[in-house]
Amino acid sequence: MRTGNSNNTSECCELEENLAPGCRAGSSQDLHDSEVQRLNAVYRGYSDRKLGSSKWSPSNPGNQAIIHERDAIVLDLLQRWGFLPLGERRILDLGCGMGGVLADLQKMGARPENLVGVDLLTERICKARERFPRISFHQANAEALPFPDNSFDLVLIFTVFSSILDQKMTGNVASEVRRILRSGGAIVWYDFRFNNPFNPNVRGMVRSTIRELFPQFLVRLQAVTLLPQLARRLGALTARLYPKLARIPFLRTHYLGLLIKP
């Protein structure tokens, strides 16, 4: 585990292979290397096309409205279901990217030593470690998470399962999440509910599929997020139009909510 404030890239990229010996329950599973390779290629393609700085530019008022709406609902859900304050909660962000969503939980009282991020791409983990050196970040295939059973109170899963097209891998990842989540803990779920006709690399996650992946969980989901392609075009009218358009059911593209483990 990297600690301190070093920004040395070579140090940052010396990622652990066995962070918790004996805890990698997924190691006996058939890991799906071909799907991992596909996901790596897709994510690197997004990076090469600089979609993070164009489509999802934080300066776009529509993107700001999407994130503000999502974060406000997450805060309300955590408060309503008794997960606040976050101070003592141990939290995993699965598919953490460069760590921004996980780090923002500190605004809700989360302690950095209780925050853990996992991502498939080494370069994302390197950047996350450089940006947030007090938070623990690991490169790993989510089919074999390097953590003991029942070790997290909350698991963030934002737009992860919609990116996995292999059904067996989907099942493996869900199994690992169920394993590492404590009884009474919750998944904070945010993902597409529709297929994207312009992106064959994602698939919508409908309620029935989510329930199949997490049987016996208490599922509380709501449709949110104005169609991003529309939201990004609202410009100076975003503050006025986003709330009104986001009330139209068929324009809401994502599910957001809690999946609570019995």
Image (tube, grey):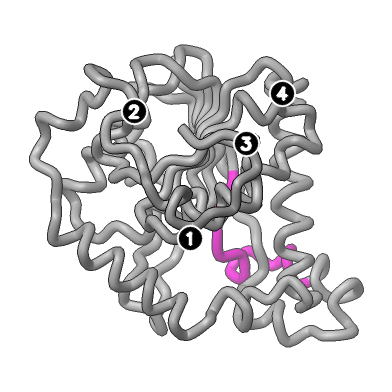
Earlier-in-chain disc, 3 versus 4: 3
Sequence order check, earlier mark of 4 and 1: 4
Could you tell me residue 55's position as x and y percent? 60, 80
Task: Tell me the residue at 27%/37% (across/down).
Answer: 17
Q: Secondary structure at mark 2?
A: loop
The residue mark sitting in front, 3 or 2, is 3
Stretch in magenta: 245-256
Q: Which residue is mark 4?
A: 86
Q: CA distance from mark 1 to mark 2?
A: 32 Å
- Crowding at dot 4, Cα within 10 Å, few <14 / some 14-19 / many 20+, comes out as many
User: Which quarter of the figure has residue 102?
Assistant: top right
Label 2 is placed on what type of residue?
Leu
> Is 102 displayed left or right of 240 in the figure?
left
Residue at the location (68% across, 76% down)?
57
> Which residue matches tag 3?
4
Residue at 82% in and 65% down: 243
Q: CA distance from mark 4 to mark 1?
A: 26 Å
Disc 1 target residue: 192
Specify which label sits upstream in the sequence, 2 or 4: 2
Q: CA distance from mark 2 to mark 4?
A: 25 Å
